Amino acid sequence: MRESRNISLLLVVVGGYILCLWVTILLNRSDRQLSLLAIATVYYAIVALIDRRRSFLLFVATTTPFLIASLSLFRYSHISLDSIESVLLLDTKATRLFALVLLPAVFFGTGADIFELPSDLRRLGMGRFVLRVLMPVLIKREHIRTQFVIIRECMESRGIAMGTRADRIRSVLRWAVPLGMAAIFEGADTSDYNAMLGTDITCLPEVLLPPFVSLRQKLCALTLFMLFATGGYTWISMAL
Amino acid sequence: MDIYGVVMRNTCELWPDAKKVTEKCETFFGTQFEIYQPSEYVVGTSYTRRVSEEIAFVLLSQAKAGVSLLSQDQFTRIWRLIEWLDYDVAALSGGWRKYLGLSLFSNQKADARLFIDASRHLSDTLLLNLLRGLEESGGESVVFLEYDILPILNVLPSLLLLHEHDDRLEIGNPIQMDCSQAGETNY
């Protein structure tokens, strides 16, 4: 069985936060920019090893210039390094930043395997409450993915090319509306269906088979990581 | 167990809900029904990926509520799903998806079950499997409300027919199967 993708992601998130703490400490030394770059590079390399995804490698390649640019900003702008430290430490602002930006960006934007989540939560000793709260929210992404596949098959069977990304972008006006409709109604209908079958979310079985991560999910990951990398830095600057 | 099919006067009443005819059924049988109604856009419970996980999830839930009839092994054997356990639910054809939902619904203990628009999209083989599975599931009566009752009659000639009137249902004579009229009995 392949190792759990969700656990890997958790390592990435926790590792990122530890990195931030280390940066806070090292910022007090003389060679700040080099220390920061060195740590970031090592961290990215480790994450790339953990994650083993092309999308992450692409992420590293595209965000490194932003990282360097951000470091330059630190040097020449009015931003105080002391205030960075206060954000990185767990005061209210940092907690908010962590909860609102980093976690959702990492979790929603990468190839987290939602179907494997119940097993992972049990491995981590988390119980039914988390399942009840998290699963209905996270599963929505899978709903939309499934509906998109169905719509794509319908369109392809009617002669509308949807095979490549370019085809999908070209035909976005054709599939976006039915996908929106399906996303809205599917949630309510699935809820009725589950009630009819008498399902209870706490009874989700352990997944024993390896997860599947689609290219679309990886692209989504890349996009959100990019948004986080660009918007996140700006937000931190503004917040400070 | 008796299996009934209702010959409806106006099948448009089946959508969006079949409240009127359901009430007539409940009055006729003098009991409350467990009602199956297909939903649009629904692929499955959506919490699981594979058929085996879907079955395990629903059966565990039903067992927890004390309404499950069969164990997982019995269920897959009786409902003839063994070959499909490793399939992704989302990858099943519409008919198979519906059959899976019907089988999971039928695993709940109930004296009487009412199936609304259950046979549409099912092949003759799946219909036959459904009727066999229902026989194994027990209960006193099963009623089908269909847009077209003929496919069920084709695989189950002994189907008991109920004819719908303004205010009631009535046991009727077997309908004349005239396949020259597009084979549809309810239109």
Image: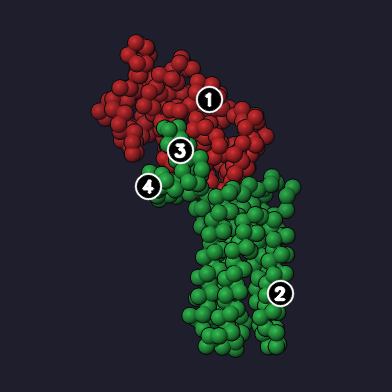
Q: SS class of the residue under badge 1?
A: helix
The three-letter code of the residue at mark 2 reads Ala
Q: Colour of chain B?
A: red
Q: CA separation, marks 1 and 2?
A: 62 Å
Check if mark 1 and mark 3 are on a common chain: no
- Closer to the chain start, of discs 4 and 3, is 3
Q: Chain of mark 2?
A: A
Check if mark 4 and mark 3 are on a common chain: yes
**Residue tagged 2:** A38
- Figure chain in green: A
Q: Nearer the viewer, residue B15 or A223?
A: A223
Q: Quadrant of residue A126?
A: bottom right
Q: CA separation, marks 4 and 3?
A: 13 Å
**Residue tagged 3:** A161
**Residue tagged 4:** A173
Q: Nearer the viewer, residue B86 or A176?
A: A176
Q: Position of residue B76 (x, y in %)?
A: 63, 32
Mark 2 neighbour density, 10 Å: few (under 14) some (14–19) many (20 or more): few
